[in-house]
Image (cartoon, rainbow, N blue to C red):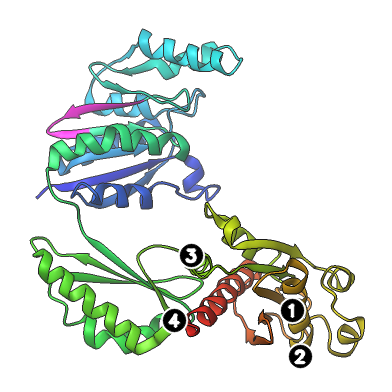
């Protein structure tokens, strides 16, 4: 049986580890919306023969083939040549596509160059897919009952093209209802811990497959419908897992859906008419960024201060110098004063503070790398959590950021 969709990611930079893939997750989720599934993904370098061989191999085995990357103006952008060789059609110049490139460049005060002309060549008979935000138009060509979609690499160019052209075309090919996927998000629990608790329930599911996806904050449990499952049975199984998670881990289960903890917490704050401010040392501004990633966050996020030095903790937050002298910057006492200080100075309902040793250097036997204190303060109270977080510097900071936001979420949920 032929696969629904396969993806070919083109680029030497992917094979050399200079760039990470930006498309597979997006394409997999997008195609599910029209009832199709990505069954295989491949990575190939910027080489005409390699691209041609892979495309020719996959054409008889899939109903829709999506290639990304290699449509730029430079001599290492050879995807169009590779596809043309695979399907045995010559490249032909499109005056319409060329004029679109010229107008695009002129609208930005620049002139199209001879180098750009190669972006106006497409396999004979291909349908050109316009690019509204760049010069690299995509194209579609149908071969051996396979629809081949060739798309530019930059995400800001590819994603509008998928929504405007690829998904409508695939919808006409497959004509199926969307594939239902339910995500249940948790924080502060390991994959093995959650599996031991929930496996007696998930192993009895008849109409879903189950994926366990660890994150730096917790674990996402993803249920994907099996082919032919009835909606009522799908609903019943999802409701069962939702209820069991609430029973088993309480507030560590924070979201049925795909919202991150920062958005869930921000919306809780907004619904309560409350606000938060953050004082960050260890996390270097990450918590503020997570909160402000979401539109409308100014309704609940008031201020953030990156107080990395001891002096800044004293000057900006009012942490007493004697507290730092007695206990150190990485201590429960300093974290407490940081959380209260930012809350008072920003006039916020809640204050969050982080301090710790992210590494790789700076640790001692008494205060090892990974030692972290996270504080959440409110009028008349504070919670400080001491943790030793594993991982490299980036991992420690990310884990601390997620935990800090979850601690605030937990406090909000405890208040109803």
Q: Is residue 157 visible?
A: yes
- In depth, the one of 114 and 397 nearer the eye is 397
Region of the chain picked out in magenta, as a range: 138-147
Q: Residue at x 56, y 57 (%)?
A: 297
Residue 340 is marked as 1
Name the residue rendered at 20%, 46% in the picture.
34
Q: Nearer the viewer, residue 382 or 406?
A: 382
Whether tag 3 and tag 2 are in contact, CB under 8 A, the answer is no
Asked whether the residues under the numbered discs 2 and 1 touch, taking CB atoms below 8 Å apart as contact, a structural biologist would say: no
The mark closer to the camera, 4 or 3, is 3
- Give me the disc on residue 252: 4
- In front: mark 3 or mark 2? 3
Q: Is residue 63 above or below residue 144?
A: below
Q: Which residue is mark 3?
A: 267
C-alpha span from label 3 to label 1: 23 Å
Under circle 3, the secondary element is: helix
Separation (CA) of disc 2 from disc 1: 29 Å
User: On the rendered image, what quadrant is the C terminus found in?
Assistant: bottom left
Dot 2 or dot 1: first in sequence order is 1
Residue 241 screen position, x and y as percent? 26, 79
């Amino acid at each position: 049986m032929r696969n629904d969709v396969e993806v070919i990611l083109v680029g030497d930079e992917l094979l050399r580890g200079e760039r990470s893939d930006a498309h597979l997750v997006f394409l997999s989720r997008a195609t599910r919306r029209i009832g199709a599934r990505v069954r295989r993904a491949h990575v190939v370098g910027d080489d005409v023969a390699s691209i041609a061989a892979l495309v020719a191999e996959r054409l008889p085995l899939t109903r829709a083939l999506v290639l990304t990357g290699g449509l730029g103006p430079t001599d290492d952008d050879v995807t169009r040549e590779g596809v043309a060789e695979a399907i045995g059609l010559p490249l032909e110049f499109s005056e319409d596509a060329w004029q679109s490139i010229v107008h695009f460049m002129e609208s930005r005060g620049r002139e199209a160059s001879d180098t750009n002309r190669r972006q106006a060549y497409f396999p004979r008979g291909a349908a050109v897919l316009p690019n509204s935000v760049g010069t690299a138009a995509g194209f579609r060509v149908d071969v051996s009952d396979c629809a081949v979609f060739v798309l530019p690499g930059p995400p800001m160019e590819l994603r509008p093209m998928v929504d405007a052209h690829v998904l409508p075309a695939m919808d006409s090919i497959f004509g199926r209802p969307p594939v239902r996927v339910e995500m249940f998000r948790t924080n502060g629990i390991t994959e093995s811990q959650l599996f031991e608790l929930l496996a007696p329930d998930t192993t009895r599911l008849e109409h879903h497959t189950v994926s366990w996806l660890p994150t730096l904050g917790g674990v996402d449990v993803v249920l994907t419908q099996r082919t032919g499952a009835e909606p009522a049975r799908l609903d019943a199984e999802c409701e069962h897992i939702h209820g069991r998670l609430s029973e088993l881990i309480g507030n560590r289960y924070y979201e049925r859906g795909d919202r991150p903890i920062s958005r869930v917490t921000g919306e809780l704050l907004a619904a309560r008419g409350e606000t938060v401010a953050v004082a960050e040392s260890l996390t270097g501004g990450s918590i503020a960024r997570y909160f402000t990633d979401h539109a409308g966050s100014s309704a609940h996020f008031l201020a953030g201060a990156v107080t990395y030095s001891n002096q800044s903790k004293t000057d900006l937050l009012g942490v007493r110098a004697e507290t730092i002298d007695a206990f150190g910057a990485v201590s429960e006492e300093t974290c407490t004063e940081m959380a209260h200080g930012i809350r008072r100075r920003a006039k916020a309902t809640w204050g969050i503070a982080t301090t710790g040793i992210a590494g790789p250097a700076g640790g001692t036997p008494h205060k090892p790398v990974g030692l972290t204190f996270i504080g959440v303060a409110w009028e008349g109270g504070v919670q400080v959590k001491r943790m030793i977080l594993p991982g490299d510097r980036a991992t420690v900071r990310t884990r601390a950021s997620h935990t800090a936001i979850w601690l605030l979420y937990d406090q909000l949920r405890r208040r109803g």
